[in-house]
Image (cartoon, rainbow, N blue to C red):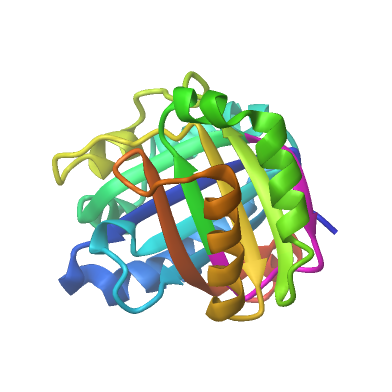
């Protein structure tokens, strides 16, 4: 099994500490059900960074969709321009938002892993220097390591889904606009140690150097919602 659709919306970021419990409740009880209820949305997930993760990158969220145009559909844009009171409150306390609509270039997994690692490439030239085909090959090879259950390569679209919506306005309340990625690698695994070995293998084989333009984080999945879950009310 792989990701459910051909496109994903990926988000990284943090929340003001005093609002963290409210953020988690909002995302699970209102935001994900609302999004997954939109035509074309297939699955949503939220993951929290391991102990010591920078507050700016503490949360990772991903929405899978049939195709990229779902993220510019009339139904979705209407939601973006009409946020609820709870949404306005949460997004106003969001820190360092990173939001990109991506094409799924490669996806292999057995189910959905409970532990995740993400690599964000923030410049196209880094990807070009390494060579995309080499990245694809190495990501598929690393999946053969014990304890890894999935790998995905996502290509960011810097022009798609960049409308100036109401939600975007609230999301920049802390002084930062949306960060856009060029490429992302997502690994899934049985625990952090397996993931760390996989990430180290990719760093060695692809000569990856962490920094402001290449960010690596580790997460534990908190909540996953699909359309079949919408029939149950918490």
Q: Is residue 31 left or right of residue 5?
A: left
Decide if residue 234 is in sight here.
no
Assess whether residue 111 is covered by the magenta stretch: yes
The residue depicted at 55 percent of the width and 61 percent of the height is 199
Q: Is residue 206 above or below residue 151?
A: above
Q: Is residue 154 left or right of residue 67?
A: left
Assess whether residue 166 is covered by the magenta stretch: no
Where in the figure is residue 17, as x and y percent of width and height? Answer: 19, 71
Between residues 111 and 191, which one lies in front from this camera angle?
A: 191
Extent of the magenta region = 103-116
The residue depicted at 53 percent of the width and 77 percent of the height is 192
Q: Quadrant of residue 72?
A: top right
Q: Quadrant of residue 65?
A: top right
Decide if residue 118 is in sight here.
yes
| Quadrant where the image shows the C terminus | bottom right
| Quadrant where the image shows the N terminus | bottom right
Q: Is residue 102 above or below residue 118?
A: above
The total number of labels drawn is 0
Between residues 36 and 186, which one lies in front from this camera angle?
A: 186
Between residues 71 and 147, which one lies in front from this camera angle?
A: 147
Where in the figure is residue 85, as x and y percent of width and height? Answer: 29, 54
The residue depicted at 34 percent of the width and 36 percent of the height is 179
The residue depicted at 34 percent of the width and 79 percent of the height is 51
Where in the figure is residue 123, as x and y percent of width and height? Answer: 42, 28
What is the chief secondary structure element of the magenta stretch?
strand
Where in the figure is residue 218, as x and y percent of width and height? Answer: 46, 67
Single out the residue that lies furthest toward the top.
159
Between residues 57 and 120, which one lies in front from this camera angle?
A: 120
Q: Quadrant of residue 149?
A: bottom right
């Amino acid at each position: 099994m792989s990701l459910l659709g051909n496109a994903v919306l990926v988000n990284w970021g943090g929340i003001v500490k005093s609002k963290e419990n409210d953020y988690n409740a909002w995302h699970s009880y209102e935001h994900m059900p609302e999004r997954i209820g939109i035509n074309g949305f297939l699955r949503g997930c939220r993951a929290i960074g391991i102990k010591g993760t920078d507050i700016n990158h503490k949360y990772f969220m991903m929405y899978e969709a049939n195709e990229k145009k779902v993220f510019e559909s009339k139904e979705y844009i209407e939601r973006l321009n009409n946020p609820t009171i709870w949404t306005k409150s949460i997004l106003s306390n969001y820190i360092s938002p990173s939001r990109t609509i991506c094409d799924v270039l490669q996806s292999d997994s057995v189910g959905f892993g409970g532990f995740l690692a993400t690599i964000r490439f923030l410049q196209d030239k880094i990807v070009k220097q390494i060579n995309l085909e080499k990245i694809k090959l190495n990501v598929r090879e690393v999946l053969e390591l014990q304890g890894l259950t999935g790998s995905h390569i996502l290509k960011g679209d810097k022009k798609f889904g960049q409308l100036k919506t109401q939600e975007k306005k609230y999301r920049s309340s802390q002084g930062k606009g949306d960060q856009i990625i060029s490429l992302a690698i997502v690994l899934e695994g049985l625990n952090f140690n397996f993931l760390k070995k996989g990430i180290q293998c990719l760093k060695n084989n692809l000569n990856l150097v962490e920094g402001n333009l290449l960010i690596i984080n580790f997460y534990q999945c908190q909540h996953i919602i699909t359309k079949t879950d919408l029939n149950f009310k918490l």
